[in-house]
Every structure is written in structure tokens, then in C-alpha cells.
Amino acid sequence: MDEEYDVIVLGTGLTECILSGIMSVNGKKVLHMDRNPYYGGESSSITPLEELYKRFNQPETPPESMGRGRDWNVDLIPKFLMANDLMGMFEKRRFRKFLVFVANFDENDPKTFEGVDPKVTTMRDVYKKFDLGQDVIDFTGHALALYRTDDYMDMPCLETINRIKLYSESLARYGKSPYLYPLYGLGELPQGFARLSAIYGGTYMLNKPVEEIVMEGGHVVGVKSEGEVARCKQLICDPSYIPDRVRKAGQVIRVICILSHPIKNTNDANSCQIIIPQNQVNRNSDIYVCMISYAHNVAAQGKYIAIVSTTVETAEPESEIAPALELLEPIDKKFVAISDMYEPTDDGSDSQIFASRSYDATTHFETTCYDIKDIYKRMTGSDFDFENMKRKQNDVFGEDEQ
């Protein structure tokens, strides 16, 4: 381990693994360590089911009705989930006209603007133009454009239109859902990016305690573990490795629910995402529900896993998610977790330490992607270019392999 690296990464959460993969593809020498004996950190998938019961300090063991414990892979943080069929709403005439406008919109072709100035006209005015009702506006802003508040409505409409275009194009590409989800749970994603890093020369060490982050002159120069120091120019880590450089930014409540049935009024879908917009329940934050099932190799035959999450706003977090839990009844078993969210106080410009943010309550990876791109820009001074990364992969594997 006594070597010099361009980048050391601490923690194998999804954010850290994606950045590790990107840096390796970019030709950096990367060392990736985790104090845990498993990949995934906060975003790991727990298996077998008995391990989930232990993690939540349940006094009992899973009943026989839950099937074989090893058939379960339960995500601790729900992300990247599939949406349900939305055609009922898409068929409404005014909304259809709005979607046609969005589909045809091209920011480089003023003929497609239909009287809208994308850099000036607010999204609120676009909604008025198409005479959309409040329920449809809530749905569009929070379920399609994936905004967490309504602040976007008074901003120029260009970004929102592009977000809705992305959703629509993804829906067209993948059929019933614009989302992708890996079989065997989200824990597979960090491992996939870890393998990408390894292909490009990255070194991985699990079960590796971190004794000290070594600083000289105010910037990081290495990491000490088991008496050895690996030197580096830059450090990426999750907040748990640098408690003195992060601050608490709120709390999230997540409730993992095991069901023996699909969620009502979802056409018996074996996966779906439900977003309850803040306005519908008099809150400042949306409530998220995602459901996956035995069809994704994450539960025993005939079983479903629904995870409810929201940002905590009161002293009684469980009462805040009651509207979502009502949608899931009857519930076989609940596991409740309330987690602190942290954000870095140090932008890394001097220290060269780049901490990720804690995962928020959303059931999609939009905010995680923003965090990854933000860290990348602060580390390299340039925007992340996915096409450039693909070109570098093609140089190694050849285009036919992609």
C-alpha cells in the first residue's frame, strides 16, 4: 500500500464508485478503500433476510411465510426505480398538447417555441398557456421533471422542458418505464463501477480501517491504514470519513415494507414509483414510494418490497409518511430508519478533499448525479463529458463491445 496515487477514494457507496470508475477511465491511478467488508456503504443491498432483521435489531427471526432468506436482496436506500404506466394521464387532451409541444421543442429552432421564450418565459406561464390544472402541474413538476420544490415554476422554462423531454425520450426508449433497475438490487451498481475502475488499473481494498487522513500545509497528502501510508494528490470520500468537514443538513425517514400483494390501483404492477407532491399533503417535501418485487430477484416468490421515504419536517417523522403507508396496506413487516443527512463544508479547492453528500429522500438518482458532476468539476476544473468517456472506453474495448 506504500505507493503514490493520483486519487484515493474512501467508501464504496454509489457516488464514490462512479467517481472512482470515471477517474480510472480518465487515466488516473486510483486506490479505493472501504472500512466495511462489503461494497455499497449506505447504498448496499442486504441479504439474506435474516441479516436485515439483525440490522434493525428485531427480536424475532423472519417467519416461514417470508420464504427463503437468501432469496431476498433489500435496498437500504431506494433509488433508480421504475415508474408505472402513465397513459391514463397522458391521454388527457390538454396534457397531450403540452407533451407534443415538449416533444417537438428544440432550443436551437425558434419555429418550435410557439410564442415561448425559453430563456425568459417562466414555467408557470407555460402551464398557463396550456391551461393545465394544479394536479397535472404537481405531477409534471415532481414526477416527470423530478423537482423537489416548486421554486422552478418562477424560473425560465428551458431546463424544465429539457427535463421532461429526457423523461419522455427515456419512456419511448424503454417502453413502459423510463427507469432502469438492476436484478438482485442496487448493491450491484457500486460493484459494477468498481469493476470498471479495476479494468482501468484501479486498486480495491475492503475491510480496510482508516486511521488518519494525512495533511501537509492544509492539503491532503495521504491516508494511513494499519500503520502504512498511501500517498495521494486528491481524496474522495463519503461524509462518515471526515466528520469535521461536514455539517448536518436535515434528516430522512425511510420505511422498508414487506408486502404479499402489489400496490392497489397500479394494474398489479410488479414495480412502480409513486411520488406524492408536497402540495397534496400540505408539506414542504414530497413523499416517495418505490416498489419492487420477486420479479427483480430481490424477494421471495409472491413477495413485494415497498420503501417509503421523505425529508423529516416535524418531531414525529412516522406520522409524516402516514399518507404513503395507507397506500400499501396490509403491510406484513416494517423496518423504520431515520438518518441524518450531511453536506460538505469544504469545497476541496485548498484541501483537495472532496466529500459526497448523504443520499436524500428521493427515489431517483437525479440529485446523486448532480453531486457526482459537481465533485468532478471541482476536482478537474472541467464539466464531465460522457461522450469523451465513451470514446476512451472504445479505445480500450473497440466500439463493437459497447
Image: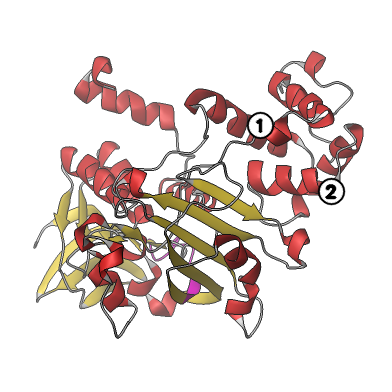
Q: Residues within 10 Å of mark 1 (few under 14, many from 20)?
A: few
* Residue extent of the magenta highlight: 338-352
Q: Position of residue 386 (x, y in %)?
A: 42, 32
Q: Which residue is mark 2?
A: 134
Q: Which residue is mark 1?
A: 87
Q: Position of residue 336 (x, y in %)?
A: 46, 75
Residue at figure coordinates x 51%, y 66% from the top left: 330
Residue at figure coordinates x 33%, y 42% from the top left: 22
Side of 40 relative to 362 (left or right): left
Closer to viewer: mark 2 or mark 1? 1
Residue at figure coordinates x 16%, y 54% from the top left: 204
Nearer to the camera, 233 or 16: 16
User: Which mark, by number, is residue 173?
Assistant: none
**Quarter of image, res 12:** bottom left
Q: Position of residue 331 (x, y in %)?
A: 48, 67
**Quarter of image, res 319:** bottom right
Report the amino acid beneath label 1: Met
Residue at figure coordinates x 86%, y 28% from the top left: 116
